[in-house]
Image (cartoon, rainbow, N blue to C red):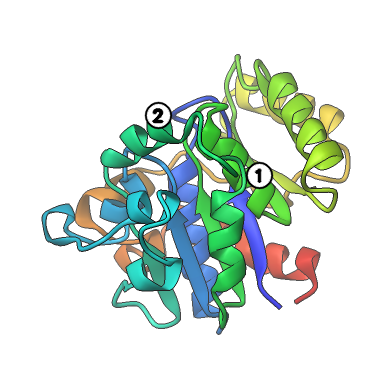
């Protein structure tokens, strides 16, 4: 059975795409056939995993418009067990076109339901509560929530959780919060430690054991088109994402 995880946070710059790419990479390394669905019009997961945007064929734009099946846009990443359905900025235009379309909230779910053979599908959703994000929540079994260890970390999360509750009530009753992942943590500062304590207070039993540290190698990896495990597997960032991926496998129970 395929486990579908939507990586989301309406706040930008929290390490959402970094988390999607690197969790997927380590799930693949653990022998799980994994597909990243780049559902963010910025297409950062597409370039961050090593694909050249100038040489892409059909993308998630065609899938969401119903012109292609998901299986027809999937590409190999060059890493064993790891595949990607890429995105380009045109996906934002497709979202506007879909605003009045039939089944506009469940296009991604329909596409994912058709595809077989993957252990995990990781959806990298846009940093907003948009039509695309709602599609991601309806298609997913779990939500993975990266939260940056900074002052405004919890601001706006209430709205996202309220949206999750509405989606669960009306369209996807099995949607569940897989976990909250603190990112860009600097253990030397009292602010990071205070934010970690706040996150733990708001999400008891949902915070991952390993937080993602602020790490230069982790920040460099996307510019080289590589997950951190391929760029520098001995870095602190790589070790943290490897541990988080292991915990995801344990939590999901696959």
Q: Earlier in the sequence, mark 2 or mark 1?
A: 2
Q: Position of residue 51 (x, y in %)?
A: 23, 61
Image point (64%, 56%), residue name = 5
Q: Is residue 14 left or right of residue 231?
A: right
Q: Residue 243 is drawn in which quadrant?
A: bottom right
Residue 88, image x, y percentages: 27, 46
Q: Nearer the viewer, residue 54 or 7?
A: 54
How many numbered tags mark residues here?
A: 2
Relative placement, left or right, of 105 versus 222 is right
Q: Is residue 31 above or below residue 66?
A: below
Circle 1: element type: helix
- Secondary structure of the residue carrying numbered label 2: helix
**Which residue matches tag 2?**
96
Residue at (61% x, 56% y) in the render? 109
Pointer 1 residue: 137
Asked if 127 appears above or below 177 in the picture, the reply is above
Splitting the image into 4 quarters, where does residue 40 fall? Answer: top left
Q: Where does the image place residue 248, in percent across and percent down from the top left?
A: 70, 63
Q: Is label 2 in contact with label 1 (beta carbons under 8 Å)?
A: no
Asked whether 64 or 186 is in front, the reply is 64
């Amino acid at each position: 059975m395929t486990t579908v995880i939507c990586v989301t946070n309406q706040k930008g710059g929290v390490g959402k795409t970094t988390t999607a790419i690197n969790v997927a990479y380590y799930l693949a390394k653990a022998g799980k056939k994994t597909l990243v669905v780049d559902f963010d019009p910025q297409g950062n997961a597409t370039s961050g995993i090593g694909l050249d945007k100038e040489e892409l064929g059909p993308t998630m734009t065609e899938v969401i418009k119903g012109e292609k099946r998901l299986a027809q846009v999937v590409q190999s990443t060059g890493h064993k067990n790891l595949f990607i359905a890429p995105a380009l900025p045109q996906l934002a235009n497709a979202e506007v076109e879909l605003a009045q379309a039939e089944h506009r909230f469940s296009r991604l779910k329909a596409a994912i339901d058709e595809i077989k053979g993957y252990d995990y599908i990781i959806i990298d959703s846009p940093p907003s509560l948009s039509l695309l994000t709602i599609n991601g929540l309806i298609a997913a079994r779990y939500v993975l929530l990266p939260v940056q260890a900074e002052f405004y970390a919890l601001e706006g999360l209430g709205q996202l959780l309220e949206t999750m509750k509405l989606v669960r009530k009306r369209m996807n009753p099995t949607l569940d919060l897989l976990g909250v992942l603190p990112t860009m943590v600097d253990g030397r500062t009292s602010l990071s430690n205070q934010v970690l304590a706040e996150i733990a207070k708001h999400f008891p039993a949902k915070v991952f054991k390993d937080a993602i540290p602020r790490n230069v190698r982790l920040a460099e990896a996307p510019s080289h088109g590589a997950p951190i495990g391929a760029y520098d597997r001995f870095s602190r960032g790589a070790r943290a994402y490897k541990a988080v991926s292991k915990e995801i496998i344990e939590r999901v129970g696959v």
